[in-house]
Image (spheres, grey):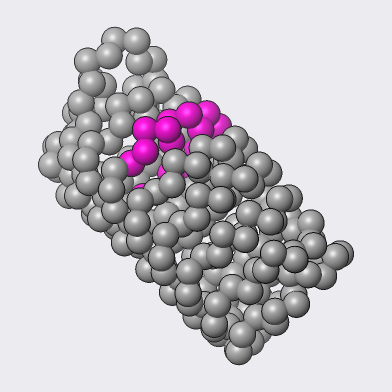
């Protein structure tokens, strides 16, 4: 039902339908909050609500979607913090919360999602430091934290993430990344890296001055 000019709010009973396995309502004009209650019954594999006009906080009850693999909520007006309860989504492989009004720190519980390969939290108002635990996501190949209000240094251990193919930290308040760790074996060769407005970056032998 994507791209159908749908408007109004999402029906409160939608996520209680026991046989619901996929929701694709992207690119509509849906508004209001995300109605995920404690009584969710679905074995939802994909939730795509991208590019609507949804507001309010991300409910902690999203963690009830224990089978969800793709959680796409980008291009809305969600606010508040990202619930740490998302770490309970053990089947999650792709999460896109970009282009919202989310704030607060990045919850380190995200590392519990061991199957994540794609994380996009860009263009929000996230603050604090990048949690060092994020480097424990060993099969992650896309990470975009750009256009936020992050501070501190980029964790040097990011260089040990063997599967990482695209990394974007641009347009934040991050400091440089420098390491003298000679045990690093993955010097970011072939990786797309965007670091605009970070004063100086040392990618373990490959220097970028911006």
Q: Quadrant of residue 124?
A: bottom left
Q: Quadrant of the C terminus?
A: top left
Residue at position x 34%, y 10% in the image:
183
Q: Is residue 192 visible?
A: no
Residue 30: image location, x then y, percent: 58, 83
Point 66% across, 63% down: residue: 47
Is-magenta flag for residue 189?
no
Quadrant into which the N terminus falls: bottom right
Above or below — where is 178 with respect to 149? above
Image position, residue 206 (x, y; %): 23, 25
Say if the magenta span includes residue 142.
Answer: yes
Residue at point 42%, 60% (across, down): 81
The magenta span reads 130-145
Quadrant in the picture for residue 184? top left
Q: Quadrant for residue 104, please give it.
A: bottom left
| Residue 13 visible in the displayed image | yes
Q: How many marks?
A: 0
Relative vertical location of residue 65 with respect to residue 164 in this rendering, above or below: below
Spot occupied by residue 77 in the image (x, y as percentages of width and height): 44, 74
- Residue placed at 24% from the left, 52% from the top? 172
Hey, which residue is sitting farthest right in the picture?
19
Q: Is residue 167 left or right of residue 198?
A: right
As drawn, 200 above or below 49: above
| Apparent side of residue 169 relative to residue 141 in the rendered image (left or right) | left
* Image coordinates for residue 93, horizontal then vertical, percent: 62, 45
Q: Which residue is at the front of the view, 209 or 74? A: 74
């Amino acid at each position: 039902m994507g791209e159908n000019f749908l408007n109004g709010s999402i029906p409160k009973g939608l996520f209680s339908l026991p046989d619901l396995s996929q929701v694709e309502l992207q690119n509509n004009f849906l508004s209001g909050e995300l109605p995920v209650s404690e009584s969710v019954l679905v074995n939802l594999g994909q939730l795509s609500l991208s590019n609507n006009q949804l507001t309010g906080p991300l409910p902690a009850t999203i963690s009830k979607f224990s089978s969800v693999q793709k959680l796409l909520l980008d291009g809305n007006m969600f606010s508040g913090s990202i619930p740490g309860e998302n770490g309970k989504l053990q089947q999650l492989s792709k999460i896109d919360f970009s282009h919202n009004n989310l704030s607060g720190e990045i919850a380190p519980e995200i590392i519990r999602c061991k199957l994540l390969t794609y994380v996009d939290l860009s263009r929000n108002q996230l603050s604090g430091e990048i949690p060092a635990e994020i480097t424990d996501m060993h099969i992650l190949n896309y990470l975009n934290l750009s256009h936020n209000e992050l501070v501190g240094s980029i964790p040097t251990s990011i260089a040990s993430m063997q599967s990482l193919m695209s990394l974007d930290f641009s347009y934040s308040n991050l400091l440089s990344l420098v390491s003298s760790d000679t045990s690093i074996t993955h010097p970011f060769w072939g990786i797309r890296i965007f670091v605009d407005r970070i004063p100086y970056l040392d990618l373990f032998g490959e220097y970028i001055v911006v």
